[in-house]
Structures are given as structure tokens and as C-alpha cells.
Amino acid sequence: MNNNSAKAGFLRIIVTMLLSLGIGALFIIGIGENPIDAYMALFKGAFKGKLRFGTTLAGFTPLLLSSVAFAVAAKAGAFNVGLEGQIFLGGIASAYIGINWTFLPKPVLLIVCFLGGALVGAAWGFIPAALKAYYNVSEVCSTILMNTVALYITSYLVSGPMSAGTANAQSHPVTVNLYQFMKPSSANVGIFIALALVLLVLFMLYKTTWGYKIRTVGTNPDHADYVGIDSKKVFIGSMMISGALCGIAGCIEVLGVHGYFLNNFAAGLGGNGMLASLIVKNNVAGAPFMAFFLSVLKAGAMGMQQSTGVPKALVDTITAVFIIIATMETLIQFKEKAKKKDKKEA
Amino acid sequence: MGAIFENLDKIINVSLIYATFRSATPIIFAALCAAITQQANILNVGTEGIMLVGAFTAVAVSYFTGSWVAGVAAAMLAGVLIAMIIGIGHIKYGADNCAIGMGVNMLALALTKFCLNVIFGMNGSFSSPDIQPIPRIKLEFLKDVPIIGEIFCNWSIMEWVVIVLIFALQYLFYKTVWGLRLRAVGQFPVAAKTAGINVNKIKYQAVAFAGMIGGLAGAHLSLGYSTQFVENMTSNRGFMGVAAMYFGGANPVLTTVGCLLFGFADSVGARLQAYGIPSQFVLMMPYIVTIAVLAISMAIKISTTKKRQSSLN
Amino acid sequence: MSEYVVTMSNIVKTFGHVQAVRHGEFTLKKGEIHSLIGENGAGKSTMMKLLYGMYPINSGEIVIKGKKMDHLDPKTAIEHGVGMVHQEFMLVEELTVLENIILGFEPTKGMKIDFDAARKEVQKYIDQYDMEVQLDKKISQISVGEAQRVEIIKTLMRGADVIILDEPTAVLTPQEAKRLFEILKNLREDGKSLVFISHKLDEIMDISDRVSVMRQGQYMGTVNVEDTSPLDLTKRMIGREVFLNIDKAYGKAGETILEVKDVWVSSNKETSKIRGMSLHVKEGEIVGIAGIDGNGQSELIEAITGIRKVEKGSVILKGKDITNLTPKKVRDAGLAHVPEDRNKRGLNRTMSIVDNLVAVQLDEEPFSKNMMITKANQDVYAEEMVKQFDIRPTDYNLPTSALSGGNAQKVVVAREVNMKKPLLIASQPTRGVDVGAIEIIRNTLEKAKKEGAGVLLVSAELEEIISLSDRIVVIHEGKITGELLASEANEENLGLLMMGGKESK
């Protein structure tokens, strides 16, 4: 039964994917270009050559973390729209530590940067979670609001106390960096850290008592309370894990990609991560694949624009259509049912 | 900090009143758009996207027809179309409000970029003297009246429209049959149904109407507030509108108060910036206040329910 | 035209495989109050929902005011003057009383709702029947009794002269109930015909002209109120044989395990608030709590198990004060709990049988070690439980949503009983469960008792209470109305106590 529903879910995603690529093709034909050429160019743009593939990987890393972060919170029943704010604050915390705590030996400093980012991200996840658990304040709206607050806090810091004094608002460079292995792209070892974290999260969710509790609270909080699991604490805990993952994503961006804190660097990361997770119904194992697919689309778009006349905004359009269709829970099921009916009548 | 006090009279003066209102107006439109669907219990996360499409359509149509009226009308129509994606997705196909709203925001951002490329061959922004802006109303007779003249004499038409709209919606929600049914549908659909009301029809109407207002919000942004289209020019005003709507509990007048708070923070922030004082703390205030208002109102609600359910009274 | 405004004859109604009404008969005269009584699930509410057109009938005939109704839905029912006040009020909390009353057929003046005209119209009914309501208050600000009056005005405004009230007093305080009766009498005097659904015999004796009884979906006859007595009605309602299918060994009760001392507990319903309840359970005995659903049983159990807050008083388990401890700590102090609603609390339907079986002992060895789940050990345990309790299907990795009611309940019972805690609370343990499972579950409770556990059993089935318990505590509206030894108890004297009456020996 479980297998069947997983299969159906997978099929749904493939159908949705093809449908949105098809709609995209219509757009491309509409502006007088050849969709097959365009899609080929897109593919090449994402994979051909060190720079392009590296850029795809660099874009994939934070998306991977944020999509899994969203899924973990969702497993406990939370809708964490606050990914972006958590990324920003995690990033700024890592940047602060990376710039100022030079008294630490480098390897230790690196670890402390990650810890600091995770901690601050978790703290930023704690606030809306506690408001929800104890005062029933919708975490959707509090996290939307807190994203902007986080953006302002970081933008104040990098244009004020932590400013490098450049025209762009950004911080001084950090003193530790993550090794970039595909130069000139900014792909860095952060991707391995991210992948390891995702595996760790999967392990945590399905092999430990913590994960069991998170899944219980997310599917039936009344049952959780009754068997003696404190559903409020678990809810808050999962939001903090989610926040910590985002904080680490911010840290990787700062230490691995930019080398300093760039104002508003994470714009769109949170939203995309959330959508990657939503498309696969918050399946933690599925989210990374969707995150990869989205980052391929994003990275390939530039190549497509350069070698064909198709503007890269088209790719965002396709992604958006993809997401919109995927969120319509009953749309494709409805079609399946209709098909069944047809079969019966035939 | 000293700079604040030295320049206090330049930061806080009569012109701040209009400046506040001026930066609040697009947010008020957005918040009203969100308030309409909220009354039907649909959280309109897609406000941002509806606005953005409206803004682009308004500029494009005004540019090609040379008529700002046509631009505004087209923007409203485009708003309805985009809003109906949310409406159909949510009401008919069970899409999560938040997810489909975010999807629509993305779609709007991508589509407007795409059209900007394809139609105008531009990247980033488009402006032209051929874009016919929404005119301003100059009240010459007020010009020399102190204070009042400074505040009222040079408003955009849309700024007068928004004031009418606030009170019209207040009237619509609380004094008309449609408004009563809308609120019933939003709060307790089963009760509305037993009273013979077609719940989904009302929801669709609300979404379409919100789309119109959202389109109007966009048109104001690109033809009134400025005369150009810039990629992502809504820059979170849709979300501010949603936040203000939360602040005011979807009541148009209270929601407007929330918007003015945002507008005030925005204009004070801009002035502080001019004197080299960081504006971010002022800018983030409305968000923090909104969260606090939400938390406090929920806490009060919980404690009154507790009291009512207690066995000790 | 006959003397009846409503005639329902030979009614049959099934929901899926469940026969809610097997044979229903009902007549209503103009200007009478006709009570419809029966136990839970006897089909009385269903009968009246059929009259209001909420579901179609399978067979039979409904005649309203001389007209045979072929296709009845709420809209046509309203058009023919039938109104219903549901148990769950159909009122929008954040709208005012006046807005709620006029919703759906608002008088208008131009674009505007004509609130003045509406107010005048409503005031007419308020004055005529002495139904005081505050028109400008929101529903969330008024009392339950007032909300009920709003519902009655709503039906009147819609032109109803046949008004069905589905257990209207279940949510009221005695004072409010008294007030409701005044209104009902006024309505009757004005020629309205009323149907009154209730459990409470004293009320029925007070207000009705005629009483119809239903039992297990079957019509059991109609009597004039002058020709009957509470005892007679109780017999008609419950009069079925008691199956004593368990050889009960009256064990020797040992030390006191659970002590509930003057406990006060909140509830969202007025009548299920617990106000000063005391009871105790000893080792090796089963104490049954008898009572009609919604009289505080759920709240009491939730309070003991730590799910709901105790506002006053204390709960002692094995000498330890467990008042307002977390559910986890209460369990650790020695409690196992089969909850009343297996789908809401008892099980996590999306998770597997084995996951559900270990839910309460997850943090303990051998089911986990250093926070790592030890799946192999869990599987061994699950295999054993599946065999011992005959859980089918036997694949313990299936989600519990795939199980029938009986097998699902066996999973809950297996999990809770197997821990051999000194106190076992079993709430409606056999509700909606097949016969085979009932036997297994009851035997399990018996066995737990023989092994020395104290058992607190809550059940709506009197037969179950009598056949399993050693002592029986009867509750009504959050208070204990009597305590009997099981050997002295029968469905009659328990029934009377459950209705809030005094024990009559």
C-alpha cells in the first residue's frame, strides 16, 4: 500500500514535470524559437564544463538544505516559511565569528562558525514555534513577518557596524573559507557537508526515537500527548532543527561562496527550498532530488539565454507553473479517477 | 544618535504626513486585496504576485494605448485572472493557500520578466515618455492654506480612490448582504450552507474581487506612485499588505492603520537614511508590532476561553 | 386532513452497513410537545434528521401537513414549516446575534441590509415568547442558553411551526433548562408543534404531552405522559436481556491504588464540567463508571491521565500525588490507558502496527538504545503481540489505518495492558468492535484484574459495566449520583441514576 502510494506520487510528479515543460514549450514556440533546442541549451548550460556544472552545484547546496529544512519542520506539522530569515541570520552569525574570532585556530574557528550559524538559525526558528505552541499564533504569518525583520537586522549590520565600507553593503571578508574544488565556479566542500547533513536528518527521522516523536507529532498530536510525547516541545524542536539547517546553509554561503556576508544574498532561497519540499509532499528523501532539479533549471537558464533567443525568465515561469500544478492536490488525482471511470465504462 | 536630535525638525514635520500616506497607499491597496479573501478565510499570500502582474499590465497597456484609464482597467482584469489561479487551485483542487500563493508570486515575477524581455526587449526595467501616468489632482484653492494646503493640494487620483475604497469596503463587509454572507462563509461555512448560501460561489467572488483590487494596487505602483515598470517593483509591499491585514484582523479601517504604520516607518526610515542614520530599526518596527499584536490577541482569546470553560464558576 | 401535522411511517435508514433506523414510526399533533427518547444510537436523532431532510430515507413515508414528501431536503423542509435546532449550533461565532438570525434571507433597503426592519421583526418573537437575547452581542460573548434561544428564533423567523430540538438540554445548566421549558410551553400555547429529543426522564415527564420510545433503531411505542412513569420509560428504553458472559470472580480488593479527591475539571460543555468528584480504585478490582455519554466521563479520565488540567482537588496514584503532572509522568507513576477514541488518541493511523505497539515504551530498552530505534527487537515484540491478541492482518508493518475497528482496538489494548501497570483505565474499550474482539478485550481486562491491577472502566454499555465491574459508580452532569456493588445493580436502578434521578429501592 505504501509502495503504491509512493509510486503514484512519483508518477504524479513526473506528469506534472512534463506538463509544465510542455507549457514552457508553448511559450517558446510563441516567441518563435525551437523548444527542443532551447531545452538542450538549458541542459548544456547546467552541466557542460567545469564552470557551469560547478555553478549548478553551488546553487544546489543551499537549496538542498533549505528544502530539507522545510520538510523536517513539516514532518512535525509546522509550515516554516521563515527559512530565508533563518538563512540570513545564520549567515551573519557565521560571518561575525569568521571575521572576529581570529584568536581561535582555523579548524576550530571553522567549526565554531558552523555552530554559531546553526545556533542562531535555530533560535530564529524557536520564536515562531513557541508562539504557535503556546499561543496558537499561526507560524505561517509570524515567519513571513520575521523574514523581513531578519533581512533588516543583517542589512543594518553589514551597512553599519560590520560594513566593509564598500559601495555594496557587505561585510569584511571572513578569515576561514570552505575549499572551492571546481574553480572558477564557486562550488565548494559545503556541498558535502550539506549532503552529510541530509543523510543525518534522514537517519534521525527514521532510525532514532527523536524522529519517531517528530513524525508522531506531525501526524497526530493528540495521540502524541496521550502516549506521553510532549507535542509542544517536539514541535518547537523540529522548528529549531529546521532553523539550524538553514543557519548552516547561510554559513556555507558566506564561507564557501562569497567569502563575506553580502546583503540580501539569500533572496529567493527560502521560497525555492519550500517549494522544492512542497512538490514532493515534504518527503525528506525526495526533497533533495527536487532541489537538484530546480537548481539545474536555474543554472541552465543562463546558458539557454546566451545560446538561443529564449530569455531565462522562461525557466522561472516553467518552475512556477510546475509548482502551481503540483500544489493542486486533486487535479491529477481527479484525472486518474476520470480515467478509471472511462475504463469501467468501456 | 545625536544626528537624530539635531535634525529632528527636518525628520518630523508637516510634510511627513503626506509622505507617510504616500508610501502607505500601495500597501493599503495590497492589504485590502488580502482582506477581501481573508474574510472568506483564504490567506492571500499571492497578493504580491497579483500586484506585480497588475503593475506590468498597466504600464504595457498605457504605453500602447496612450490611455491611463485603459491601463488601469487592464491591470484590474489581469489581477482577476491571476487571482483566479489561486481561487481555482484552492477552492476546486484543494491547493494549500500558502503554497499556491508562493507559486503565483513566482509566476508573476517570472512572467513579467519574460514579457519585459519579449515585448519591450528590456532587462530590469522599462520606462518611456509614452507611458501615460495616472494624473494628479492639484487643488489650487488650497495651495496657500497653511498646513492643510501642504498636505492635500497635490494628490494622485489613486490616493483619493484608496480613501473611498477603504470606506466602501468597510460598508461592504459590515452593512451589505454580500458582506454578511462573506463573513459567514469565512468563519463557519457549514452554518452558511445551512442558511442556504452557496459557499464556493461567494469564495470565487471574493477571490475575483480581490484580484481587481490587487491589479489596481499594481497599477497605482507603476502609473501613479512612479511611471515605469521595474522587475520585482512590488518589493515585498504585497507581504506588508498581508501583515497589515493581520494587524487589522481584515477590518479595512484597522488594516489601514497597520498600513500607515508601515508607511510611517518607511518615510521616517528614508529621512533617517538621508542623514546617515541607519533606518532598519524603524523599518522593522511595524513587523515586530504586528507579531506582538498577534501574540497578545491570541493570548487574550485563550484566556477568555479558559475562563468560560472552567468548572470553578 | 388528519389530526397530525407530521406522520412518518415504516421508516428505514442505513448508513453503509449500519442500520441506524430499522423501523421508525412517528406522529406529531398540532400544538403538542412530543418527546422522543432512547439510548445512544437508538436512532432518535437520525429519525428527526430524516424529517428535516438532511439525509434521504431508504424506504417508508414522510407526510408533512397532509402532503407526502418525495424528495426532502432542508430547503423544502423549511418551506413546509419544519425547523430544527441542532445539537451543535449553526451559529457564526464572530457575527452578532442579529446577523446570525437574518443570515441567508436578509431584509434590504437599497444596497444596505435593513437592520432596523430586521430588529423590529426579531423583537416581535422575543416579546411574544419571552426569549430574551442581546441582539448586538457576538455569539462568542453570549451563554450557551442564549445561543440556543437564538437558534429557536432563527427557526421561527424562517416560518417554522414544527420545531425539532435535538437534545437541547444537554448543554444547559438546570436554570437555563428551566427557562427553555418556559419558552417551549409558550410556543406550544401559540399552536407550534415541538419535537423534543432527550435522555432525561424528569424533564420529559415535566414537559411532554406524548412520549415515543426508540431502541436499537426500532420504534417501541408511544404513550401519553399521564399514562407512564420514569420507571416504565426506563424499561422501554433499556429493556433487553443482560448477557453475563464472563465468569466473574469477585476478587479480594487490596490496597487503594487510585484516589480521586474532590476534583474539579473544566470542559467546553456546561454539563460535562466536573464539579467536586471523589472516587477510588483498589488493587484487584474493576470499578465501572456508568453514565450517559457527555456527562463528564471523558473529562474525568483526561484529568486523571494528565491530558486535561485539574482545577481543584487532587489525584493520588499509589501514594504519589499525580495532580497535573504530564501524561508521561503519570504513565511512569504506574498508569496504562485505553482511550475512548482509538482513532483520535489511541492510534496513529498513518504509522505501522509495530510503531503503535511500542509507542509508550519507545524510550525504554529493548525498543531503543541510546535513542537509536532497535527495530529487530520491536519486530520480535510485535510478532508476539500479533499472535497473542490475534491481530489480523498479521503483517505488523502495515499502517493501522488498514485495520478493522476490532483489530485496531486490539493493538491499543495489547500495548496498554502488556505493560502490567498497577492501574489500568479502559474507556469505551469495546465501542464499535466486533464480537470476537469484544471477547478478547473483556477477557484481557479480567486477566489484568486477576493479576492484581486496579481497573477503572468507563462504558456507555450498561451490560458491559454490570458484567465486568465489582463496584459501579454512576455519574450525571459531572457529579456522582450513586455507587453500587455490581451484585446489587441492574439496568433499571443504574438507568435511573444515569438520568440524574434518585436511587429508588
Image: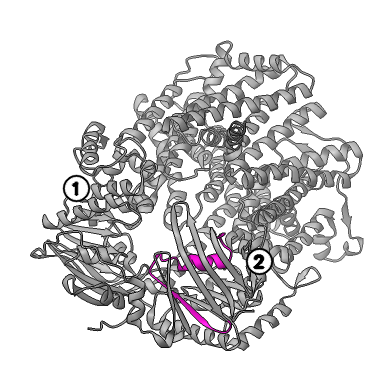
Q: Foreground: B132 or C395?
A: C395
Classify mark 1: residues with Cα within 10 Å, few (<14), some (14-19) or many (20+): few
Q: Which of the colour schemes (rainbow, by chain, secondary structure, one colour) is used?
A: one colour
Mark linked to residue C76: 2
Q: Foreground: B234 or B95?
A: B95
Residue pictured at 42% horizontal, 52% vertical: A130
Q: Foreground: C6 or C49?
A: C6
In percent of width and height, residue A9 lies at 51, 31
Is residue C52 shown in magenta?
Answer: yes
Q: Which residues are magenta?
A: C30-57
Question: Would you say residue B165 is visible in this rendering?
Answer: yes
Local secondary structure at mark 1: loop
**Residue B113 image-quadrant placement:** top right
**Residue A11 image-quadrant placement:** top right
Mark linked to residue A58: none
Q: Earlier in the sequence, mark 1 or mark 2?
A: 2
In percent of width and height, residue C164 lies at 54, 74
Q: Amino acid at mark 1?
A: Asn
Q: Amino acid at mark 2?
A: Thr
How far is disc 1 from disc 2 in space, using C-alphas?
A: 55 Å
Q: Which residue is mark 1?
A: C418
Is residue C496 shown in magenta?
Answer: no
